Image (cartoon, rainbow, N blue to C red):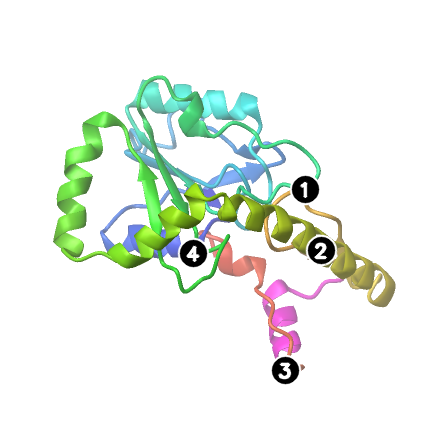
Amino acid sequence: MEDPGYPGARAALMSVGARLVPRLVDEEGLVIATRKLSGIGRPRLVYVTPSHQCPLGVVMSVTRRLELLDFAARTKAWIVEDDYDSEYRYFTRPVAALQSLDRRDRVIYVGTVSKTLIPALRIGYLILPESLVEAFIRARRTMDRQPAITDQAVLAEVMSEGWLEKHIRQTRIRYLERQRVLVNVIHSEMPDLLDASASDAGMYLVAYLKNRITSADAARCAAANGVDVVPLSAFSLRI
């Protein structure tokens, strides 16, 4: 799992007894192991957020994506590609999803509309290797025999009529403008405290502290003054 990485995925994996192995993230995304992983044996699953790494915002390079796919094929590991907000790209074209590059059926692609539409619409979707379809159907039926059919029907109409695509285009412009305002305010109001630059993707911004205060202490100070921020330390597996 990426480190730092998404706490929700970390909690879900730990709840079923998974042993999590942190892997560093650099400017190209997850750093793939090129040798045996310190005696842990063959990984069974790799969890990644390649389109907009959570929380650092890095977009995994094409080279690193191909390396990861090759690694998964050699070790017979599954890749969970969590593509939670790839619709929001501001300056460059989207990079091809791992799932679209996968020729050996190792990728489980996970998506959602809760970011693009409204958080209350809890509809997600999967693109699965053929060999896993039946197992996931059985698991889905075990979880809930009466899914939100009405919500799904309405969403299908929104998509088929082109309204979802129009909504994404409009909100992409709005979010980019909000990001510019936020970056400008950080530069003008707190130049000695935070280092922040525009992000090419996603719906949030990562800023780095310039002084010796920890992210956890900074978050507590902000909360005491009515500002809600999330410390990067909360995303780390190794703390």
Q: Residue at x 28, y 58 (%)?
A: 150
| Marked residue nearer the N-terminal end (2 or 4) | 4
Please provide the residue range marked out in magenta: 211-224
Q: Residue at x 31, y 32 (%)?
A: 43
Gap in Å between the C-alphas at discs 2 and 3?
24 Å
Contact (CB < 8 A) between labels 2 and 1? Answer: yes
State the residue position of label 2.
179
Gap in Å between the C-alphas at discs 2 and 1?
10 Å
Residue 139 left/right relative to 216: left
Tag 2: residue type? Answer: Gln
Contact (CB < 8 A) between labels 3 and 4? Answer: no
Q: Secondary structure at mark 1?
A: loop
The tag on residue 7 is 4
State the residue position of label 1.
90
Of badges 1 and 3, nearer the viewer stands 1
Say few, some or many: other residues with alpha carbon within 10 Å of mark 4 (under 14 / 14 to 19 / 20 or more): some
